[in-house]
Each structure stands twice: as C-alpha cells, then as structure tokens.
Amino acid sequence: MAINAPDSYTQIGNYNEAQFKSAYALLFTPEIWNEWYEKYSDGFKILDFLNMANRTSSVANRAYSHFEDGTDQRVATTLAAIPVGVAGANITFSLLATDYDAFGNGPLREHFSVYIPETYQTAAIDVPRQYVITNIAGVGAAQVYTASPLSADSRIFVQVPASTELMIGSSVYAPGMNQPTGMTTGTYEREHATQISKESCGFEGGSVAHRTYREVIDNAGQPGIFDRGLVETEFRLDRQIDSALFLGEINANALTQTSNFGGTPNRQGTKGLWNWMAELAQTKNYIGDFDMDDFDDIKPLLQSQGVNGAKVFFGYGSNLGLDVENGVLDGVKEYSGGSDLLPNNKFFEVDFRRAKKNGVDFTFQELVSFSNPSTYGNDSYDFTDSGLMFPITDVSVTAEGKKMTVPNLSIAYLNHNGEDRTRIMGTVAGLNGMGYKFSNDADGLMFYLLSEFSLFAANVNQMIRILKT
C-alpha cells in the first residue's frame, strides 16, 4: 500500500488536444468553484472531508490488507460472579471468552496480580486490594484462575458481579524464582477491496453549439473546454463514491457480470465506514436530546482504546446537529451570558463549529450522507438522529511487510504500473463538429467517467457511533 496522494486527481483519455476538462483539474477562482459546489454537490460529505484533509492514497491491488497490533495493556473481565468469602482467603474466577484471542491467549499470567475494587471489600477498606494469580488450570477460554490476597484482612464482603473489569497489576515473586511466561499480543488483519463506479453524460449533435461553455486552463497549463453538464456529471459520480464510502459493502455474494473482454468477473464493492463501525467501533447511545452532559461520556470511551489528547471529528445528521447546537447554546447561556450572538448587531446567529469538553476537542460538521431526504435522511432510516466520531490522527499499521504511519481514515485509489484509475474521464465521439475523431456514426458524443477506489479504515475500535435509543 502506498500512502502518498496521487499526483493528479484525474486521468484523461480523449482524442485530441481540445479536450473536455475535469472540474477538479481546473484553475477556477474560489468564487466560481464555490458557486458550482453549492449548486451541484449537495453539500459537505465524507468524501469532501477526505479530499480537503488530503486523506487520499493509492493501492496496487484490488484486494489488500493491513495489520493492526493488539494492545498489551488490557483488563480481565469476570465470566461469573466471585462469591462472598472470608478474610485472607483465595478466590477463583474465569474470564469472558472475548478476553482471549483466536489462539486461546488471555490477559492474565501466573504470578501477576489483579485489583479487587474497594466496593466489594469490607467498609474498613477504602482502596483496591491486590490478589496474586497463584495458579491457572485448564486451557484457552476454559482457564480457571486462583488468586491469593497479599493482605490478611482482604475479603470479598460483597459479591463481585459477572462482567466486572479488573485492573491487572504487577508481578509478585519470591527470591530465586524463574521468569514469567512471555506476553502474547494479537495481530488483527483488516481486509479491503476496491469498488468501480461510473457515470456518463451525452451531448447530442448541435447541442454544444447552443450551450454556454468555457475555454479553460487546467492546473498543468493546458487548454480545454468546460461545460455545466460535465460538473453535474462529476458531482453525480462524487455522490456515488460518497455513498460507497459511507454504506458500501464488499461483494461477498459472488455477484458477477459478463465482461466485454471475456469471463464473468465479480462486481467490485468496498466496505463503507458505517459498516466498519458497526463491526468494530464503540457505541454511544443517547435518549431524548444529545446535550452537553453526553459529551462527558466520550473521553472514557476514547481512553479505553488508548486515545489521549487527539482532536475528534464529530459528523452528524440534521436532527442530532440541532441537539448539539442547542446543547452548546444552553451552555453559553448558563456559563457565558455576555456572549454576543448578534454579528454587527444585525441578525441572530448560532454557528458553533468546535467545542472542548472534558478535555476532548471536538470539530462539528453536519454530513449530507446523514441528512439528505432523498437518501439516508429519508424517514425510512434513522441517520438524521445518528452521528459518528473519530480521532483525527495517524496510526501505525503493517502493510506489504513494512511498518508505516498512515491516516486512520482515507480514500485509496487503484494506481499502479502506470495505470491511474483515480478518476478516468474521456470522450467517445460520433459525428461531431468539435474536432474529435469519429469512432461511430452517431450524431453526438459521450463523456464517460470511472473511478476505482476503496475506503481505508484503521483502528476503527477507536471510533464511536452515536445512536439514539
């Protein structure tokens, strides 16, 4: 996997020098670009975030994987309750199957310790008490641990419930003993696949003569022509790509097509972010309105996955966005009554884009992917009340046998051996008066677009889905 952004956002496949140009390759002024974006793009999308943050990369294969190292600092989660006992007595317990990796390796080793919270000790004990693992019986997830307290007055006075997470402490040895067994950490393989999406636009013979088009210069200084129909077509392709980045699925059902070049290859589909998060991310549920108190729950979720101090992108649907805005506004009214929400004393404006709460720096952004009433914002779905959060950070992964640092979220295009499939655009011309070579006898020409891409997502366990219950 290569992590550098492509040199060009588009590849051109046309018949002469006076070729149509991609909107992404042109030297438009910001004013013109903003006009086109507002008119045809349907607003801010996940694709826009990835492009604006330069989170683009290239891959050499249609199917590829990366590997993530499991953490070596975990908790031990009790399978069943630990019963009430007497002072100084041993305890025995087992752990949930999810505490073990595929090879039966768990988080606890003999001679290491766990801490029983003071909640389950007698009233006279107001600190967690240390119990040393003195024996491990069985194998894999069937292991039973025996632990002995270091203090004679340590006692399970209140039953320790099932699914209690116990902190793992230090090893405790007598002189002259052997070394502990090595610590085993898991490595997780994440599989990705590219998707092929296409869009088309046709110009009937004579229609260009009656349309307004621009003679333009692209970023490489080459001349060309640009038409409104082209930008409409490109933004339609963008919507397709954004849809796949958000809710796409890998073709695991052997859906095929008959190729023009022989054979019946599988349709190419990529796994979208929402599906990655449903599988691996954490979930923050909220009831009623999402208010400022709900932000306080985010830091513990991030810290539980080893995230500290990162900025967090918070994308949401329109209903959840209104909750966030009203919640921040309530905070302003309560704690900052002197704030001026009347710019130039002309109109009332509430425009919160960032907030820092409980030490976490949030950046807010409504996503069209969640709000468009013609797509996921339709009443048949729940996305207007939903959101997603992820740290804006780079992560260390292993790909192609090498350790590398990459953004935790990016769009990766197929680009290898001189074939760049980032965004291929070209014309197939029939009879035309524009100088294109004839390739058929139709009166007009077609403009075609193709992109082969995938969503690259890493450390998805550090991301958070926001769901209304």
Image: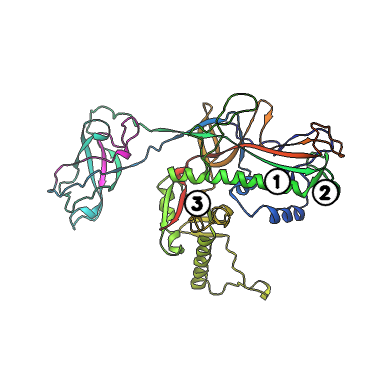
On screen, residue 178 above or below 95: above
Q: Are marks 3 and 2 in contact (CB under 8 Å)?
A: no
Q: Which residues are magenta?
A: 88-115
Horizontal side of residue 442 vs 199, given as left or right: right
Magenta residue check for 231: no
Which part of the image, by quadrant, shows the C terminus? bottom left
- Find the distance from the CA under tag 3 to the CA under tag 1: 31 Å
Q: Given the image, on which type of amino acid does mark 1 rest?
A: Thr
Q: Is residue 184 left or right of residue 415?
A: left
Residue lying furthest left: 86
Viewer-side residue, 98 vs 128: 98
Closer to the camera in the image, 342 or 111? 342
Residue 175, how many percent across, how many down? Answer: 23, 31
SS at mark 1 in the image: helix
Q: Amino acid at mark 2?
A: Tyr
The answer to which quarter of the image holds residue 294 is bottom left
Q: Which residue is mark 1?
A: 233
The mark lying in front, picked from 3 and 2, is 2
Which class describes the residues within 10 Å of circle 3: few (<14), some (14-19), or many (20+)? many
Mark 2 closeness class: few <14, some 14–19, many ≥20 residues within 10 Å: few
Indicate the position of residue 121 as horizontal and vertical percent values: 19, 53
Residue 426: assigned label: none
Horizontal placement of 93 versus 387: left or right?
left
